[in-house]
Image (tube, rainbow, N blue to C red):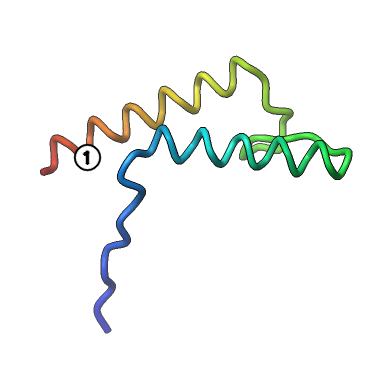
Amino acid sequence: TCALPISGPEHPSEAFQTMLEAARTVAQDLGGTVCDESRSTLTPQSINHLRERIADFGRRQMLKA
């Protein structure tokens, strides 16, 4: 079988913002917290770090095109 590449969102930073807002809403409704991939509470600093990673990923994708 041949694996097909999965395309990501057209605007990754906007997709991240939408996802973050949804996660915050769910966490608030359920009385929980939003965590990162290592299960640490998401802080403004960690959100900025994720945004930087998304921007780096976007730049790398542009270089491939």
Residue of label 1: 61
Q: Secondary structure at mark 1?
A: helix
> Who's the residue at 72% across and 31% down the image?
40
Among all residues in the image, which is located at the extreme top?
A: 45
Q: Report the side of 39 relative to 58 (left or right).
A: right
Residue 1 higher or lower than 52, as above or below: below
Residue 5 location, quadrant? bottom left
Percent position (x, y) of residue 15?
45, 41
* Quadrant occupied by the N terminus: bottom left
Farthest residue, direction left: 65
Position of the C terminus by quadrant: top left
Q: Position of residue 43 (x, y in %)?
A: 67, 20
Residue 31 lies left or right of residue 52; in this view the side is: right
User: Looking at the picture, does residue 19 appear above or below residue 5?
Assistant: above
Choose top left, top right, bottom left or bottom right for residue 37: top right
Taking the image as shown, residue 65 lies to the left or right of residue 9, namely left
Taking the view exactly as shown, the residue that stands out farthest to the bottom is 1
Crowding at dot 1, Cα within 10 Å, few <14 / some 14-19 / many 20+, comes out as few
- Total labels drawn: 1
Q: Amino acid at mark 1?
A: Gln
Which residue sits at x=32%, y=61%? 6
Where residue 10 sits, quadrant-wise, is: top left
Name the spot of residue 16 as percent of width and height, x first. Answer: 49, 37
Q: Is residue 21 left or right of residue 51?
A: right
Q: In this view of the protein, which residue sits in the foreground, 31 or 62?
A: 31
Front residue of 27/43: it is: 27
Name the residue: 22% across, 34% down: 60
